[in-house]
């Protein structure tokens, strides 16, 4: 029980599922900015409509402009797909916290503070990070607020604010630990479910649906590379002679070779039957492509699979290099398929490289 609480507080899930958490923190940054804009504008409108009763606060006008600027910044961060969105989040909310502290202390020393209390209370609902780090951030903000409050207000009002702060602090700490833990568990469950839906059950790499979708995204973004179709030679003979279980093992071993050779920036998946597809962003240059294909052939040829009595396994490959202009998945596949046909026409264990003719 203690170990589980310790792991939850340290937030090890954050490291395991960093990419999904990055996406969610980007969305939270957008939501936080929208909420900030709405609240700031609402306060400004309220003060304008009731100007005889409520004093117009320039600080909220500054906050509204600041939050609008954050929306544009968040859009820029998303385009760059920065991995540091979490630290950008802390950087963005810190000036807001400073403004909230000033509003509740030096800028209005005669009134009880409420703005900073609200921000401390709701912060864990927006940010998705390790609980200990969120707790540390909240603690630092609370300490700074206490010091400013003590310096700006009379002692009686300081005590009232301090009691309120303690209540909000423990509320935030509880929200941080329990709700944030549930959110991290939700991320873990979501990622596991997504991986199952995206993975070919037999080989453990992408299935056709998600693999094709990811290559389509790369072509839309004009990310150049080499599109390769791998076809296992005499796979029907392997199945008929040694059984389908042995054929499955051959597929699994070849998938391992592909996974070990290509990077996480590449896309590779099982097309179905005895075919695999690889889109390598490192192989837009022909010489580099030939080096990769050579290593791929050597590694597959070196496989020692006991269930097929160490029968040599080979593949035929059709490769289409896309290094200029624009294209789509269908055109890439047709080009790769033509190259594969040429390879098979030459016999077993050959590869053919073609260059995609594109529109500029």
Image: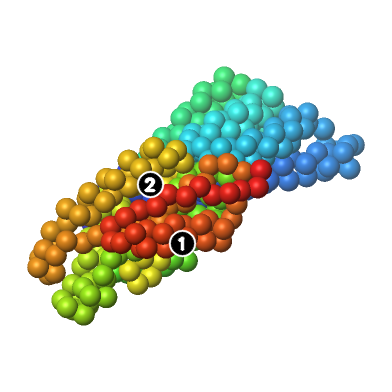
Q: Nearer the viewer, residue 324 or 168?
A: 324
Q: Does any portion of residue 328 appear in the rendered image? A: yes
Q: Residues within 10 Å of mark 2 (few under 14, many from 20)?
A: few
Of residues 159 and 128, which is closer to you in this image? 128
Label 1: element kind: helix
Residue 210 image point, x, y percent: 47, 62
Where 330 sits versus 7, above or below?
Answer: below
* Secondary structure category for the residue under label 2: loop
Q: Is residue 241 left or right of residue 264?
A: left
Identify the residue at horizontal 51%, vertical 26% (top origin).
144
Residue drawn at 61 percent across, 24 percent down: 153
Task: Tell me if residue 285 comes above or below residue 189 in the rendering.
Answer: above
Residue 337 is tagged as: 1
Work out whether 343 lies above or below 67. Answer: below
**Residue 199: x, y in percent?**
37, 64
User: In the rendered image of this protein, does residue 284 appear above or below residue 59?
Assistant: below
Tell me, yes or no, if residue 176 can be seen here.
no
The C terminus appears in which quarter of the rendering?
top right
Quarter of the image that includes the N terminus: bottom left
Image depth: mark 2 or mark 1 in front: 1
- Cα distance, mark 2 to mark 1? 24 Å
Residue closer to the observer: 321 or 53: 321
Specify whether 232 is left or right of 123. left
Point 80% across, 39% down: residue: 44
Q: Mark 2 vs mark 1: which is more N-terminal?
A: 2
Residue 112 placement, left or right of 239? right
At 67% from the left and 40% from the top, the residue drawn is 71
Q: Residue furthest top?
A: 151
Crowdedness near tag 1: few (<14), some (14–19) or many (≥20) residues, C-alpha within 10 Å: many
Residue that mark 2 sits on: 264
């Amino acid at each position: 029980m203690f170990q589980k609480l310790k792991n939850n507080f340290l937030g090890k899930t954050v490291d395991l599922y960093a990419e999904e958490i990055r996406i969610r923190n980007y969305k939270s940054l957008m939501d936080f900015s929208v909420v900030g804009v709405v609240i700031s504008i609402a306060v400004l409108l309220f003060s304008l409509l009731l100007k005889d009763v409520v004093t117009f606060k320039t600080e909220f006008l500054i906050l509204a402009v600041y939050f609008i600027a954050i929306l544009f910044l968040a859009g820029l961060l998303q385009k760059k797909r920065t991995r540091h969105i979490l630290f950008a989040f802390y950087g963005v909310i810190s000036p807001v916290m400073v403004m909230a502290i000033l509003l509740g202390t030096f800028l209005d020393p005669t009134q009880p503070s409420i703005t900073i209390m609200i921000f401390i209370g709701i912060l864990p609902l927006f940010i998705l990070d390790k609980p200990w780090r969120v707790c540390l951030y909240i603690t630092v903000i609370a300490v700074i607020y206490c010091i400013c409050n003590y310096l700006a207000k009379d002692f009686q009002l300081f005590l009232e604010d301090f009691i309120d702060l303690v209540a909000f602090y423990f509320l935030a700490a509880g929200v941080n630990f329990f709700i944030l833990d549930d959110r991290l568990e939700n991320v873990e469950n979501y990622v596991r479910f997504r991986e199952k839906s995206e993975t070919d059950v037999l080989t453990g790499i992408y299935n056709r649906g998600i693999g094709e979708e990811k290559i389509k995204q790369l072509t839309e973004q004009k990310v150049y590379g080499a599109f390769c179709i791998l076809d296992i030679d005499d796979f029907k003979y392997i199945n008929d002679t040694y059984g389908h279980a042995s054929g499955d093992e051959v597929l699994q071993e070849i998938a391992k070779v592909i996974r070990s050779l290509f990077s996480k920036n590449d896309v590779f998946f099982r097309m179905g039957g005895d075919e695999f597809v690889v889109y390598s962003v490192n192989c837009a240059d022909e010489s580099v492509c030939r080096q990769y294909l050579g290593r791929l052939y050597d590694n597959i040829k070196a496989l020692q699979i006991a269930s097929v009595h160490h029968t040599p396994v080979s593949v035929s490959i059709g490769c289409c290099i896309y290094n200029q202009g624009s294209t789509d998945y269908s055109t890439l596949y047709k080009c790769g398929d033509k190259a594969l046909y040429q390879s098979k026409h030459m016999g077993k264990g050959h590869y053919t490289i073609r260059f995609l003719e594109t529109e500029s």
